[in-house]
Amino acid sequence: MKIEAFSSNLATLQELGKRLKAQRIAGNVTREALARKSGVSLSTIARMEAGQSVAIDGWLSVLRGLNLLVNVDMLVPETQISPIDAMQYGHIRQRASKRKETKESNWKWGDEE
Protein backbone atom coordinates (compact mmCIF):
# COMPACT_ATOMS: atom_id res chain seq x y z
CA MET A 1 0.00 0.00 0.00
CA LYS A 2 1.20 3.47 -0.74
CA ILE A 3 0.82 6.02 2.04
CA GLU A 4 -1.30 8.84 0.68
CA ALA A 5 -2.21 12.28 2.02
CA PHE A 6 -5.72 11.05 2.80
CA SER A 7 -4.59 7.88 4.62
CA SER A 8 -5.79 7.71 8.21
CA ASN A 9 -3.28 7.66 11.04
CA LEU A 10 -4.24 4.07 11.80
CA ALA A 11 -3.75 2.95 8.19
CA THR A 12 -0.41 4.77 8.04
CA LEU A 13 0.80 3.18 11.29
CA GLN A 14 -0.24 -0.26 10.06
CA GLU A 15 1.62 0.25 6.78
CA LEU A 16 4.73 1.50 8.60
CA GLY A 17 4.53 -1.52 10.88
CA LYS A 18 4.41 -3.89 7.90
CA ARG A 19 7.37 -2.13 6.30
CA LEU A 20 9.35 -2.19 9.53
CA LYS A 21 8.76 -5.92 9.94
CA ALA A 22 9.72 -6.56 6.31
CA GLN A 23 12.96 -4.58 6.73
CA ARG A 24 13.78 -6.43 9.94
CA ILE A 25 13.19 -9.83 8.37
CA ALA A 26 15.07 -8.88 5.19
CA GLY A 27 18.04 -8.01 7.38
CA ASN A 28 17.69 -11.35 9.19
CA VAL A 29 17.27 -9.57 12.52
CA THR A 30 15.10 -11.02 15.29
CA ARG A 31 12.85 -8.82 17.39
CA GLU A 32 15.03 -9.62 20.39
CA ALA A 33 18.24 -8.59 18.64
CA LEU A 34 16.65 -5.39 17.37
CA ALA A 35 15.35 -4.56 20.85
CA ARG A 36 18.85 -4.97 22.30
CA LYS A 37 20.50 -2.97 19.52
CA SER A 38 17.89 -0.19 19.62
CA GLY A 39 17.54 0.05 23.37
CA VAL A 40 13.75 -0.35 23.27
CA SER A 41 11.61 -3.09 24.73
CA LEU A 42 10.50 -6.14 22.82
CA SER A 43 6.88 -5.11 23.36
CA THR A 44 7.59 -1.72 21.73
CA ILE A 45 8.83 -3.45 18.58
CA ALA A 46 5.82 -5.77 18.63
CA ARG A 47 3.49 -2.74 18.94
CA MET A 48 5.26 -0.98 16.09
CA GLU A 49 4.98 -4.00 13.80
CA ALA A 50 1.30 -4.37 14.75
CA GLY A 51 0.61 -0.78 13.67
CA GLN A 52 -0.02 0.57 17.14
CA SER A 53 0.95 4.04 18.31
CA VAL A 54 4.51 4.36 19.63
CA ALA A 55 6.39 7.51 20.63
CA ILE A 56 8.61 9.04 17.94
CA ASP A 57 11.78 8.45 19.97
CA GLY A 58 11.02 4.72 19.87
CA TRP A 59 10.74 4.88 16.09
CA LEU A 60 14.00 6.80 15.83
CA SER A 61 15.81 4.24 17.99
CA VAL A 62 14.50 1.30 16.00
CA LEU A 63 15.26 2.95 12.65
CA ARG A 64 18.79 3.64 13.88
CA GLY A 65 19.07 -0.02 14.92
CA LEU A 66 18.12 -1.07 11.36
CA ASN A 67 20.45 1.53 9.80
CA LEU A 68 17.43 3.33 8.32
CA LEU A 69 17.61 6.57 10.29
CA VAL A 70 19.07 8.46 7.32
CA ASN A 71 15.71 7.99 5.56
CA VAL A 72 14.01 10.22 8.14
CA ASP A 73 15.65 13.16 6.37
CA MET A 74 13.11 12.70 3.58
CA LEU A 75 10.14 13.12 5.95
CA VAL A 76 10.66 16.81 6.54
CA PRO A 77 13.28 18.13 4.15
CA GLU A 78 15.33 21.18 4.98
CA THR A 79 13.75 24.39 3.75
CA GLN A 80 15.72 26.12 1.05
CA ILE A 81 15.45 29.90 0.94
CA SER A 82 14.23 31.02 -2.44
CA PRO A 83 16.25 33.66 -4.29
CA ILE A 84 13.22 35.96 -4.24
CA ASP A 85 12.89 35.68 -0.45
CA ALA A 86 16.62 36.26 -0.08
CA MET A 87 16.37 39.49 -2.08
CA GLN A 88 13.09 40.62 -0.51
CA TYR A 89 13.85 39.86 3.13
CA GLY A 90 17.62 39.57 3.16
CA HIS A 91 17.38 36.72 5.66
CA ILE A 92 15.55 33.48 6.38
CA ARG A 93 12.01 34.15 7.54
CA GLN A 94 11.36 33.24 11.17
CA ARG A 95 7.55 33.08 11.04
CA ALA A 96 4.65 33.05 8.65
CA SER A 97 2.65 36.18 8.02
CA LYS A 98 -1.10 36.56 7.82
CA ARG A 99 -2.58 36.45 4.38
CA LYS A 100 -3.92 39.75 3.16
CA GLU A 101 -7.62 39.72 2.59
CA THR A 102 -8.58 40.38 -0.99
CA LYS A 103 -11.50 42.64 -1.70
CA GLU A 104 -14.23 41.29 -3.89
CA SER A 105 -14.22 42.87 -7.29
CA ASN A 106 -17.36 44.14 -8.92
CA TRP A 107 -15.84 43.48 -12.32
CA LYS A 108 -18.05 41.57 -14.78
CA TRP A 109 -17.67 40.23 -18.29
CA GLY A 110 -20.50 42.38 -19.51
CA ASP A 111 -22.65 39.58 -20.89
CA GLU A 112 -24.38 38.87 -17.59
CA GLU A 113 -28.02 39.73 -17.29
Image (cartoon, rainbow, N blue to C red):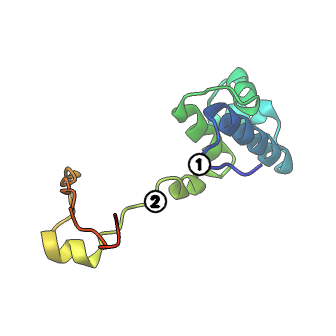
Kind of residue at badge 2:
Pro
Residue at image location 72% in from the left, 52% down from the top: 2
Residue at image location 76% in from the left, 45% down from the top: 19
Residue at image location 15% in from the left, 73% down from the top: 88
For mark 1, what is the residue? Answer: 5
Question: How many labels were placed on the picture?
Answer: 2
Which is more foreground, mark 1 or mark 2?
1
Q: Nearer the viewer, residue 104 or 107?
A: 107
Estimate the spatial distance between the alpha carbons at disc 1 and disc 2, rounded to whole Å. 17 Å
Residue 47 appearing in the image: yes
Q: Give the image quarter of residue 18.
A: top right
For mark 2, what is the residue? Answer: 77
Q: Secondary structure at mark 2?
A: loop
Residue 90 appearing in the image: no
In the image, 40: left or right of 72? right
Q: Nearer the viewer, residue 28 or 108?
A: 108
Q: Secondary structure at mark 1?
A: loop
Q: Is residue 111 above or below residue 15?
A: below
Please provide percent x and percent y for residue 108.
Answer: 27, 68
Q: Give the image quarter of residue 7.
A: top right
Q: Nearer the viewer, residue 8 or 75?
A: 8
- Circle 2 packing at 10 Å, graded few (<14), some (14-19), many (20+), is few
In the image, 72: left or right of 41? left
Q: Is residue 62 above or below residue 105?
A: above
Kind of residue at badge 1:
Ala
